[in-house]
């Protein structure tokens, strides 16, 4: 290992330091490079949700880099092993330790293990943060799908215009048995299987999640969308839709349930009709992300809505 830090699994006693590190590292990077530190808010408190969610979802898989002399947390990297792939995110290094190989060191054993398991590694990387893009690019990750990050201040009176066709057929599900059905649907469309994530959302014990589905007239699933209603992370995704019409109905319905809030969501740039509709509803662009994969990229049909919590590249 490096002369100045060691790697070890992240544990519950690290959670407060992790929330502080995530906030400090993001504010510092975005303020010093883009003058946009304020977008992460004044406090680390909302970031407590991240280690709490990840500990529940993938206990023992998060990585910590600690200063050898002081033991202080210098970096964190969250890892989500699934049977079809390994998802990675968030990766963050303390401002004073950036550029010294901490992030590369945390990712190296994750990649080595995925290679041994013959699984691709997937993540979603900001295209505004070239340090993170190039970190992954140098490690061999290849960008393949471009996403627009949109935010929408949902009026308390609801979105403008008529509800889309089929929006009245979108329904919430809470039964844990749905996890297998959602995972099978995503596997069929995108070659990815993440049943533990869907079981986590449906159990709804850490965070505040709503899972909605749309089915056709025969009861066959055509799409689903998860929404995080927790005040620390008001965000839509992950989700999968057979086509843009299904995606519009799912999005409208999830947004309608967030009146008075300003959720963020990622939409594939290629979904032109969906994006046009989001603008009509009042959406604004806030970032660009690319899905990057190390290893084979499964062919995808339909659309996906990735998210940062939990990382679902
Ligand atoms: C992105 C981030 C995690 C990188 O962490 P880090 O510990 O500074 O990264 P490393 O020192 O391991 O450097 C990684 C590699 O990227 C390279 N790199 C960095 N910026 C680069 C650039 N603009 N062009 C090309 N290569 C670049 C480094 O040279 C290094 O490559 P090498 O190992 O082959 O020499 C860190 O900047 C950070 O915490 N940013 C804020 C949080 C964030 O945005 N996280 C990512 C999104 S979740």
Image: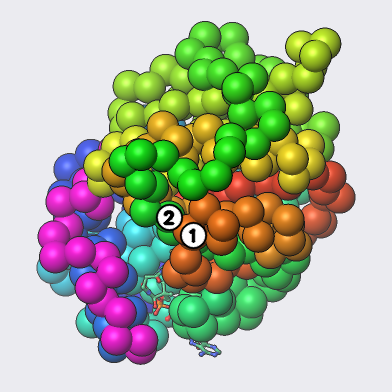
Tell me: 239 left or right of 131. right
Mark 2 falls on what kind of element? loop
Residue at x 61%, y 47% (from the top left corner): 305
Q: In the image, residue 143 lies at what x, y percent?
A: 70, 69
Image quadrant containing the N terminus: bottom left
Mark 1 in CB contact with mark 2 (< 8 angstroms): yes
Residue at x 78%, y 41% (from the top left corner): 243
Mark 1 falls on what kind of element? loop
In the drawing, what numbered circle is on residue 126?
A: none
Q: In the image, residue 216 lies at what x, y percent?
A: 78, 19
Magenta region, residue range: 33-52
Q: In the image, residue 269 lies at what x, y percent?
A: 68, 64
Q: Earlier in the sequence, mark 1 or mark 2?
A: 2
Query: Which residue is at the front of the view, 28 or 102?
Result: 28
Q: Is residue 48 magenta?
A: yes
Q: In the image, residue 40 lies at what x, y percent?
A: 26, 65
In the drawing, what numbered circle is on residue 152?
A: 2
| Circle 1 crowding by C-alpha within 10 Å: few under 14, some 14–19, many from 20 | many
| Circle 2 crowding by C-alpha within 10 Å: few under 14, some 14–19, many from 20 | many
Residue assigned mark 1: 283
Residue at x 58%, y 49% (from the top left corner): 306
Tell me: 275 left or right of 295. left
Tell me if I can see residue 115 in this picture.
no
Q: Report the magenta stretch's main SS.
A: helix
Q: How far separated are the C-alphas under marks 1 and 2?
A: 4 Å
């Amino acid at each position: 290992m490096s002369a100045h830090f060691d790697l070890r699994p992240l544990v519950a006693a690290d959670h407060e330091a992790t929330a502080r590190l995530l906030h400090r590292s993001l504010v510092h990077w975005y303020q010093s490079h883009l003058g946009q530190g304020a977008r992460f808010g004044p406090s680390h408190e909302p970031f407590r949700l991240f280690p709490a969610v990840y500990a529940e979802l993938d206990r023992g898989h998060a990585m910590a880099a600690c200063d050898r002399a002081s033991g202080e947390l210098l970096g964190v990297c969250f890892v989500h092993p699934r049977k079809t792939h390994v998802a990675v995110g968030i990766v963050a290094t303390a401002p004073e330790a950036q550029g010294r190989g901490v992030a590369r060191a945390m990712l190296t054993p994750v990649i080595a293990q995925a290679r041994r398991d013959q699984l691709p590694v997937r993540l979603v990387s900001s295209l505004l943060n070239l340090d993170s893009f190039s970190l992954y690019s140098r490690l061999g990750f290849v960008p393949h799908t471009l996403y627009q990050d949109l935010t929408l201040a949902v009026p308390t009176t609801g979105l403008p215009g008529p509800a889309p066709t089929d929006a009245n057929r979108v329904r919430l599900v809470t039964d844990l048995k749905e996890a297998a059905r959602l995972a099978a649907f995503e596997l069929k469309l995108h070659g990815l299987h993440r049943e533990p994530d869907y079981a986590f959302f449906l159990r709804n014990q850490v965070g505040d999640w709503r899972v909605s589905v749309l089915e056709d007239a025969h009861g066959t699933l055509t799409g689903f969308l998860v929404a995080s209603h927790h005040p620390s992370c008001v965000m839509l995704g992950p989700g999968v839709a057979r086509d843009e019409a299904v995606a519009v109905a799912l999005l409208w319905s999830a947004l309608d349930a967030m009146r008075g809030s300003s959720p963020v969501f990622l939409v594939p740039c290629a979904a032109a009709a969906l994006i046009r509709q989001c603008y009509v509803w009042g959406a604004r662009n806030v970032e660009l992300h690319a899905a990057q994969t190390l290893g084979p990229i499964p062919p995808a049909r339909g659309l996906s809505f990735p998210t940062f919590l939990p990382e679902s590249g």
